[in-house]
Image (cartoon, coloured by chain):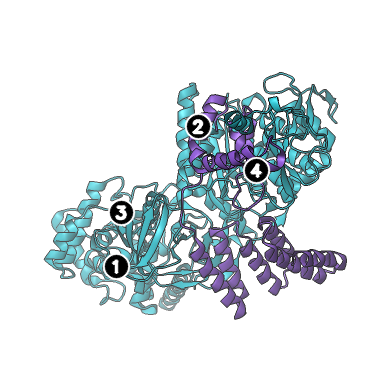
Chain colours: A cyan, B purple
Amino acid sequence: MVVLAALVVLGYSVYLGKTVRVKFDGQRWAAPAQIFARPLDLYAGAGISAAQLKAELRFLGYREVTKVSGPAQWAQSGERFAIHIRDFTFWDGREAGQSVLVDIRGGSVARIRGERGGAEIDLLRLEPALVGSIYPAHNEDRVLVKREDLPDHLVNGLLAVEDRRFFEHSGVDLRGIARALLANLQAGKAVQGGSTLTQQLVKNFILTPERSLWRKANEALMALMVDARYSKDEILEAYANEIFLGQEGGRAIHGFGLGAYFYFNRPLSELRLHEAALLVGLVKGASFYNPRRHPQRALERRNLVIGQMLAQGFIDQADADAAIRQGLGVTEAGTLNSQRVPGFVELVRRQLRRDYREEDLTSEGLRIFTTLDPWIQQQASSALGKRLDVIEKARGIERGSLQGALVVASAQDGEVQALVADRDPGYVGFNRALDAVRPIGSLVKPAVYLAALSRPEQFTLSTPIEDKPVDMTLPGGQRWQPQNYDRKVHGTVALHESLARSLNLATVNLGMQVGLKPVISTLRALGVERDIDAFPSLLLGALSLSPFEVSQVYQSLAAGGFHSPLRAIRAVLDTNQQPLQRYPLTVTQAADPAAVFLLTRNLVEVTESGTAAALRQLLPQRLQVAGKTGTTNDLRDSWFAGFSADHVAVAWVGRDDNAPTGLTGASGALPVWADLMRGIENQTLQLAAPPGVEYHWVDAAGRLSADGCAGAIAFPYIAGSQPKTRADCSENEQRGLGGLLRDLFN
Amino acid sequence: MARSTSNHTGRALAASVRAVLVPVVFAAALVLSGCGGLSRSDRPARVEEARGTVAAPASATVTADTQIAAYSPPAEPQIARAQPNRAVAVLLRRAEDQQRSGDLDAATVSLERALRITPDDALLWQRLAGVRMAQQRHELVLQLAAKSNALAKADERGLRSENWRLIAQSRRALGDDVGAREAERQAAALR
């Protein structure tokens, strides 16, 4: 009997020991992938305003001080910034932090120098902000820290409040239990716990939260085993990474490493006494002492921790007084760095899934360097949210019924700079930017015109085309009689005018002349991967794409006909900062650059005097952009796609239930797009004609003419495609500057 | 740019008279006093775009037709901004060093970073093509060199010639001898 009992105890102990080992060793290495924004390059000439630089420093959790005295601090005086940059390991090597002076003038960087009369610096970068992570299905998110990363204040605080004999006991602290028991008896209720850090760890790690004597016994037994097997430092490190510190939606905040970011937006090593004390205070109850929801309670708890640290000699009176005078200092929930870019992170996740297994992403501690520009993301997100509010109010649309998406990429290399998937930036759910696959309406037209302009012997910007009624039978037997938006027929119009005014009938007639096949292959070349039905209705946008897919098409146009796959990731490093993979820049020529140039000219006309002329009132006057409006049947989808020299952006506005919104492309998506473009640094489209394009003056009838002739316009032509007939414009018809001058000087 | 004539004229003049029209009008006046009429060859005002290609004449801004405005280059100069040449030069040098020491991946990274600063720099695209050539990525070389050609100014003959040389070399490596000879011809014509 005794032997049997002994065997059972022994067997059970072996079982517990194994559980401890598996959990402890296994758990320690489950580290979610960390997602970083792009680093900000600083150099003389960089288009960065003082407001943007300040925002960037805040994203990074740098402290604003009056005099910079250490890493991650900045001070501002007028347009001069003193910044002490953190050390950081990039995908192309480690960069030592340094202290610099950055002068901004009129919205761009004028000069960068080393501190204290240092030499001029040609190029440097701010490290990228941590913007999210990919954590496992059971929703535990953490930023792993090592024992040596734990600040003394934090460890001392833990010892003072939770387990003062941690370094002496062997997993269970009998004296502590006795002390707690006594205190509780005296108070008549439970005021102190006798659990050691080790016991707390075991409890969190291994056991269910039921409260029973049996569980207590198990917990104590396992704590003894853990203590026997692992060093105090290992236990401390595991505790620091395991501890539950808060909840945000479905995401559980675990460990002090992530806690530091979650509450203070900075690395744990940079926390000061009062901040570390707050985190220690949260150990007792992260939701009860939630500093964002119950600031007073959290403050009292924090000050109690500071008091205990003082009482036990970890800090002196002056330190304690100074710390207690500090406010809580927590960032507002909803700042960029607390997982506020779920839409973009989802894109990153999908692009990573091609190369990595899900469990690698959630447990291998990968460092993922993305293309996200936090500043542009913030502007985009605010443009969508605010503009939809305005539109609903102005038009008496039910509040909150409109939804939208916005994608921004760099024009030439296709890096995704921002992605807004919902008007509420923190919403995690249906990703409209990636998954709202909607008819694109007139956004398809540039592909029709590009297919036409790619045949210069047949079509030029001034070629007359017929805006006449269309009556066709579609392959399904359905009769198709599209109309213009104004329900009128405009007769013969110049090709450029038809696109500028987005004439449906002229476009269908042009498209049928060109043929559906070339239009489809143009769309393919520009980056559409989805199946495309070869129906004539394609010419008016009977093709459904997501805003992201549309962005790809317009990126190819914005890059002069060179397609670069839209990328959200630059590089992936492993947990030891060694490069695993890079996602390099590639280009594929999608169309003749000369034809794309003509089309771009035409798309500029759209924004100057065509269907998107409203942009002129919304954008700075010197900013020339190209773009296209899109509206679908019954005003269900409102689109705008366009680009400046450096950004391509696509906005979609509609309803989740696909009901009509009452908005055209120009009244819904266009102002969202304009608000975004106004909020970010943009270079105007330069429209430099590529080799093989020349300008010719052409009159209204499409004949070559002199530049002074009435109604004559200078059009770009692919060399040799200009009209052959010459207009005979007599002298008295000459107006314009030439005529004006002659009148003056004759 | 406005669409109504009076508005348009006023605004366009206000915007560009100082910079463009005054000297141009003066020059045109000299021309006109010397000869009778206007012909295409002595158009009074021609704004040269940065790239040196033919651009729409500035006289377009005072005609009645609204469409002309859409096809002329921006009337106002951009806000003066320091040119990021030095930052790009640093990265170009770094890429050259990296390529010389055989670290082609690092050279790619440096050139891509430079391209984020000046994405319309034909030389950077060509250098990237050069690094890809060293990596035997011939398909990519063809594309990068074509991109460089599309961005090159007409008078950058040496640069364009080098692009064609890279294209010729890659076409040959890919077994396209006819295409390679054609590219070599282009390269030679530009030298």
Q: Which mark is residue A285?
A: 3
Q: What is the secondary structure assignment of the residue under circle 1? A: loop
- Is the residue under label 3 in contact with that under label 2 (CB below 8 Å)? no
CA separation in Å, label 2 and label 3:
66 Å
Q: Which mark is residue B11?
A: 2
Q: Position of residue A266 (x, y in %)?
A: 36, 60
Q: Position of residue B47 (x, y in %)?
A: 60, 45
- Is the residue under label 2 in contact with that under label 1 (CB below 8 Å)? no
Residue kind at label 3, given as amino acid type: Gly
Position of the N terminus of chain A by quadrant: bottom left
Q: Nearer the viewer, mark 3 or mark 4?
A: 4
Residue kind at label 1, given as amino acid type: Gly
Whichever of labels 1 and 4 marks the residue nearer the N terminus, that label is 1
Residue sticking out furthest to the left: A317
Chain letter belonging to callout 2: B
- Is the residue under label 2 in contact with that under label 4 (CB below 8 Å)? no
CA separation in Å, label 1 and label 4:
46 Å
Residue kind at label 2, given as amino acid type: Arg
Viewer-proximal residue, A715 or A546?
A715
Residue A382 relative to residue A736: left or right: left
Q: Which residue is mark 1?
A: A70
Q: Nearer the viewer, mark 3 or mark 1?
A: 1
